[in-house]
Image (cartoon, rainbow, N blue to C red):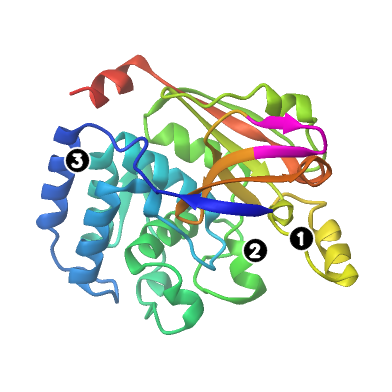
Amino acid sequence: MSTDATDAAPRDAGPGGARERAHAVVTGLGAGPWRLDRAAVADRLHELVANPALIRQGRLNLCGPAALFHVWLGRDPVAAVTYAAELFEHGHARVGELPVRPSAALIRTPFGRTERERSCAGADWMMMAALRDSTNRLWPYTRTSGLREAAAAITTPKVLRRWLRATGLYVDVRDETSLVLRRPMAHVAGLTPTADRDVFLLVAQEMFRTPATRLRRLRDRTVSLLPNHWVLQRAPLEADGRTVALRFWSWGADYQGALERAAFARCYYGALVADVGSDTASHESK
């Protein structure tokens, strides 16, 4: 897929008053047990309050938590950075009523030693990895590379739906995904994100690239038999003959570009559709 990153403007950055209160929470950040530099964490949290779209998993497989924190920082920055501050200071926090208690092994991780780790800011990693580790049953999220990291980072639609509901942002989060069967193009054609609706597409990220060799193309076709990536849809899909135009957020930026219709159809597994409630809309306007 040929993409051009657009300006990462905070489309859902929330009201100015809420952002000011969120910055105040970050300014008061204390010390904590994580092996992360406090000043670097605070600077990054200030950046994310100003522009939630910047949060990114880098080369780690934390796309589900990244999508969650993008919308949470945008719609309720005070709650999101309060979570981050409490997590940094105490080693545990809450997403709404959902307790987040990462393992001691994760908290003791000296993050930032490898190029792979440095592709993700320490504050971003802390927020995302702690949530992922805390809610894992089989594999703790304590490594940043290898097959074990990829397995432990998997975020199923059921889990992401639970996280989204826990934030209190939404009155309804509908699961219209499939982990086995691809959803038809007619389904995504009917999805329209708005100021009061967030749409999280479940895809195989192989749709975004066109390998040069036949062997790599075969590999991608095999990998795309299962979904492996979450993106936030930015606008209705536009179809034109053999291509479709997609605007989406992922990897810390907004993207737009055209890709082959067949590739999209092969890699599309549905969406979570989250509708904001009137209470949340009222909160955002204050």
Which numbered disc, 1 or 2, marks the residue closer to the eye? 1
Asked if the residues shown at circle 1 and circle 3 are in contact, with their CB atoms under 8 angstroms apart, the answer is no
Q: Is residue 200 left or right of residue 134?
A: right
- Residue for badge 3: 19
Q: Is residue 240 magenta?
A: yes
Seen from the viewer's position, the closer of residues 10 and 125 is 10
Tell me if label 3 and label 2 are in contact, CB under 8 Å.
no
Residue 217 to residue 99: above or below? below
The image shows residue 30, relative to residue 74, as above or below, that is below
Question: Which residue lies at the image location 77% right of the left edge and 30% below the top edge?
Answer: 185
The CA distance from mark 1 to mark 3 is: 40 Å
Residue at which label 1 appears: 210
Mark 2 falls on what kind of element? helix
Placement of the C terminus among the 4 image quadrants = top left
Region in magenta: 237-245
Q: Which residue is mark 2?
A: 151
Any magenta on residue 248? no
The foreground one among 76 and 219 is: 219
Q: Position of residue 58 (x, y in %)?
A: 49, 65
Q: Nearer the viewer, residue 179 or 3?
A: 3
